[in-house]
Amino acid sequence: METIGNHIDDGRLLCRNSIYQRYSTSDWETSNRNNFLEAEKQRSHAERVRADLFRTVKVTDQMTRTRQQCNTRKLGRLRAAAANVYEKCFVTVETGIISLLTHFQCSSSV
């Protein structure tokens, strides 16, 4: 007998595995169903994780915006207060310089 591929020339299969199947149809169906259910669980879990992450990003973004607005207001108040202090100091220094100049001018003429 001559062998060609997996067949013997008289039409019989060479492998004994083809006579005795390794897995039955119900084994395949059970395996496929289990794989389908596992894939569905993983998709569901991934969707929950994605939704949680999206909510976390939104909350973090809102907290950041709120903090930035609060700090901007505080900086505005500090700038205004610093400007007032600077203006008062400048007026005080300017008044002091004018009085010193007046004093020196008066004392040099004497």
Image: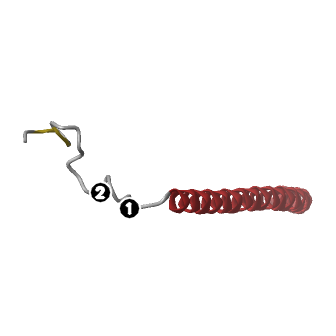
Q: Quadrant of the C terminus?
A: bottom right
Q: Residue at x 23, y 38 (%)?
A: 11
Q: Could you say whether the residue bearing mark 1 is in a helix, strand or loop?
A: loop
Quadrant of residue 96 within the rendered picture: bottom right
Tell me the residue at 76%/57% (across/down). 51
Whether residue 49 is situated above or below residue 4 in the rendered picture: below
In the picture, the quarter occupied by the N terminus is: top left
Label 1 crowd bin: few (<14), some (14–19), many (20+), radius 10 Å: few
Element assignment for label 2: loop
The part of the image, by quadrant, that contains residue 7 is top left
Left or right: residue 3 versus residue 106 is: left
Percent across and percent down for residue 24 are 47, 60
Front in this rendered view, residue 77 or 93: 77
Q: Judge whether residue 82 can be spotted in this image.
A: no
**Taking 25 as reference, is 79 left or right?**
right
Q: Please tell me which residue lies in front, 17 or 86.
A: 17
Mark 1–mark 2 Cα distance, whole angstroms, equals: 7 Å
Q: Which residue is mark 2?
A: 17
Between discs 1 and 2, the one toward the N terminus? 2
Amino acid of disc 1: Arg
Q: In x, y percent, where is residue 13? A: 24, 46
Residue 37 numbered tag: none
Which residue in the rendered view is the most extreme toward the front? Answer: 10
**Label 1 belongs to which residue?**
22
Q: Residue at x 84, y 57 (%)?
A: 62
Evaluate if marks 1 and 2 touch, with contact meaning CB atoms under 8 Å apart. Answer: yes
Q: Residues within 10 Å of mark 2 (few under 14, many from 20)?
A: few
Q: Amino acid at mark 2?
A: Asn
Using the rendered image of the protein, determine whether residue 9 is visible from the camera's viewpoint: yes
Image side of residue 87 versus residue 6, left or right: right
